[in-house]
Amino acid sequence: MGAFPSYASAQPQAQLMFGAFYSNGQNESVSTTNSEIIGFPVGLSYQDNRWSASVFTSYLRTYRYDQVKLNKPVSGIGDTFLSLGYDLMQAPWVTLSLNHKLPTGSVDDGTSTGKSDTGVQLDYFSSLNDTQSIFSSLSYKVTGKVDGVDMKDPIFASVGLSQSISDSTYIGASLGYNQSIYKSVSDTTGVTVFSGVQVDKRRQLFFSGSYDSSKNYQFGINFSLQLLQ
């Protein structure tokens, strides 16, 4: 969502991103509905005409609840996510992406399932007028199955609207449906609100918050730096 303004440029773009987030509730890395995660993501993305690619990972500090809160959190690098996309259409944009998860996190620490996942995703983005845009996303993932755990291949769908409120600031919201990779964990519907601020030609701040039907909530801040001019 923070990359919306990049659709307007036909020049090659590379962005470095880093940030922080806090999540409380359902955890997809392990089959638990009650956990806290503090994360520090870092990533790199590149776009040239119709092609785009990205890689990112996070440093995670995880607190897991069972009957009582554990006295000590566990920390470590999470999984690494790779994506390769191609714009089937431009203005409006329809992008088909291949996504892959490398299990670089720790199974013991609850930051990974220890298995690779591969999925496909279709994104749509269109400007309604000079200040409003709509977007939607649909994805399907083939999950790496863990022995002895009831797992499934989930789908995700979302639709949303963004509104420019000045030359440098936009806000928006989206509704999403997310299937869990675990058969024992409920699927969720939720809402996300966000805002992006273009600090200057190279730097952007992105704020987001979400809440879903499992009572999971998350909020975060990301900073992106344009590497190519």
Image (cartoon, rainbow, N blue to C red):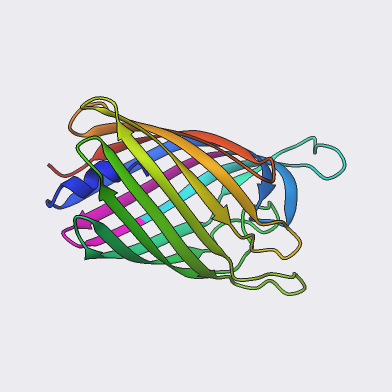
Q: Which residue is situated farthest in the right direction here?
A: 67
- Report the front residue among 118 and 137: 137
- Report the front residue among 50 and 110: 50
Q: Quadrant of the C terminus?
A: top left
In the figure, 169 relative to 130: above or below? above
Left or right: where does residue 137 sit relative to residue 75? Answer: left
Left or right: where does residue 123 sit relative to residue 183? Answer: left
Q: Which residues are magenta?
A: 39-54
Q: In terms of secondary structure, what is the magenta stretch mainly?
A: strand
Left or right: where does residue 229 sit relative to residue 5? Answer: left
Instruction: Give the image location of residue 26, x and y in percent.
Output: 68, 47
Residue 191: quadrant of the picture: top right
Residue at the spot x=33%, y=47% of the render? 134
In the figure, 197 relative to 39: above or below? above
Residue at the spot x=30%, y=59% of the render? 53
Instruction: Give the image location of residue 140, x and y in percent.
Output: 50, 68
Left or right: where does residue 209 sit relative to residue 147? Answer: left
Instruction: Give the image location of residue 129, x and y in percent.
Output: 21, 40
Residue at the spot x=80%, y=35% of the render? 71
Q: Is residue 197 visible?
A: no
Count of numbered labels shown in the rendering: 0
Q: Which residue is situated farthest in the front direction here?
A: 128
Residue at the spot x=23%, y=45% of the render? 6
